[in-house]
Image: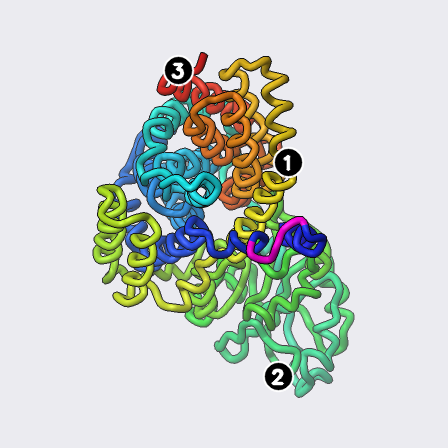
Amino acid sequence: MITAMTVLLATGVLSGPQALAGFSNEGLITVAAMFIVAAGLHASGGVDILVKSLLGSPKSIRGSYLRMFTPVFFLSAFLNNTPVVATMIPGLLAWCKRININPSKLMIPLSYTAILGGTLTLIGTSTNLVLNGQYQSLTGEAGFSIFSITIIGLPVAICGLIFMWLFFPKWLPDIGKSHAFENVREFTLEVMVEANGPLVGQSIQQAGLREQKSVYLVEIERNGTLLTAVTPEQRLQGGDRLVFAGDTQGITDLLRIRGIVASTSDAESTVLSADRPERSLVEAVVSPHCAAIGETIREAKFRQRYGAVIMAVARNGERIVGNLSTIVLKAGDSLLLEARPAFVSRQRYNKDFLLINDLGKESPNHDKAALAWVILIALVAAAGFGIIDMLHASLIGATLMILTGCCSVSQAERSLDLTVILTIAASFALGVALQQTGVADVVASGIVSLSQNQPWLMLVMTYIAVSVLTEVITNNAAAVLMLPIVLELTSKAELHNEPFVFAIMMAASASFATPLGYQTNLMVYGPGGYHFRDFLTVGIPMNLFIGAVTISVIMLIWPIN
């Protein structure tokens, strides 16, 4: 999108102010402010309190769906979906274990419920906010209120929840949470430094332990003290017990090194079997924004960059065996990390990882939870009753979250999803270019011709076009690109543009068919232990069903002949 904007600017298709207008759009600024509001509620523990009070102890899968639907549906209507799902995943994993239900039955419904909840209000998803901002700039009209889309989103979402409740317990695989990390001994091995041997006094680097291809040094136990995330300069002492992760067949290579001997500990008292305050074992999912994506573990310099060591990697629900250091990281990979306890608090609100299983059991400070809820409710009420507009309400809410300590400035900064913001801002330039160059006019004329002037068919074609684009590019970009075309279309056909704009909003959000189509789908991919086909199995029927219900509801509210 940035490249397209640059080309349009450099070739003179758009002037500077036209190309950069998206960066000052009210919808974009509102999205950024709402990221901070969501961060305040997330960081204060406000989401955790609501979730824990509503989950309870259901006796069946369908009962667990009803318990989960309520908090996720409500929260997603007023918060960005990503922090809602990020907060829910660790809680649901623990809950699944307690009520004896496999997470694979709940993770996809969690994502889909968040997506449906986001369609309830104008602030439920960034797509709605951005589309409203572009609509205002292109038409000069006042735009939509916070609950304008609710008349469509609510019945569609309820139908979607019923559809999941009826069919997903049977359709989703019963594979449980990935057991890839269940037995640590399967991918770790332990050796000792020989007392008075040739390695005593040497650094890890000098001893050649850093250059091993099939295994990776995780930690050292020395005289009852644990050294985690050890550096290459760390000096060895006699009797050190070294824990390596990777291909356990590599133990023979290690034992060939003079000065390394087999560990004298018995199988039940390995270094990793004991709980230590110096150690934090964390299961984390690589987010789409992780800086290490596309690099091997060795190239990513994981230890230096994050202060943690990767002990194992799982993909598609299965642990990747073999040479750990050569694995190229991908979004959605599940990692078992060993780190110092500070890693958890440092990364909890970082966009690189979604922490899904912190064995340290750290929890956020809940002192500000009630205050965060008051700020959010006041924000929604002020905008809903028209006291102030959505832009002012979101900016005031974001400011109050920081000033009252519900989230810190650094947490607020990390909550701003730069990828989303830049994509949205740059896609505005493409939208303007479509309109200025006459492309929107040509495409709109083509749709009118193909539909033989049948308004209902134009609506269906609009929905399908946005739905397909959403799977190919981002949902925000798909919506922004289609709006100028739809405005031309409705102008030529002399139709009201509101039902078509709402169709764009719904189609852009309703992305269920693949884990790549929507960020929350990717977030639950690893924790649920899913394969790509699992999303296709339930997502394609969900896409078709939600599309049919959306078109039906729109035509019922705005009769189109």
User: Residue 471 in the image: x percent, y percent?
Assistant: 59, 35
Q: Nearer the viewer, mark 3 or mark 1?
A: 1
Left or right of 225: which side holds 244? right
Question: Residue 557 occupies which quadrant of the picture?
Answer: top left
Tell me: residue 110, above or below residue 296: above
Left or right of 488: which side holds 25? left
Lower sequence index among marks 1 and 2: 2
* Residue on which disc 2 sits: 237
In the image, residue 112 lies in the stretch drawn in magenta: no
Label drawn at residue 438: 1
Tell me: residue 512, above or below residue 296: above
Q: Please report the bounds of the magenta region as a residue range.
A: 13-17
Give whichever of 150, 80 is nearer the camera: 150
Label drawn at residue 559: 3
> Residue shown at 41%/21% (left/top)?
554
Residue at mark 2 to residue at mark 3: CA–CA distance: 81 Å
Lower sequence index among marks 3 and 1: 1
Label drawn at residue 54: none
Residue at mark 3 to residue at mark 1: CA–CA distance: 30 Å
All told, the count of numbered labels is: 3
Give whichever of 514, 251 is nearer the camera: 514
User: Residue 158 in the image: x percent, y percent?
Assistant: 35, 26
Tell me: residue 453, above or below residue 108: above
Give whichever of 125, 14 is nearer the camera: 14
Give whichever of 399, 145 is nearer the camera: 145
Q: Nearer the viewer, mark 1 or mark 2?
A: 1
Q: Nearer the viewer, mark 2 or mark 3?
A: 3
> Residue shown at 65%/40% (left/top)?
437
User: Residue 197 in the image: x percent, y percent?
Assistant: 70, 83
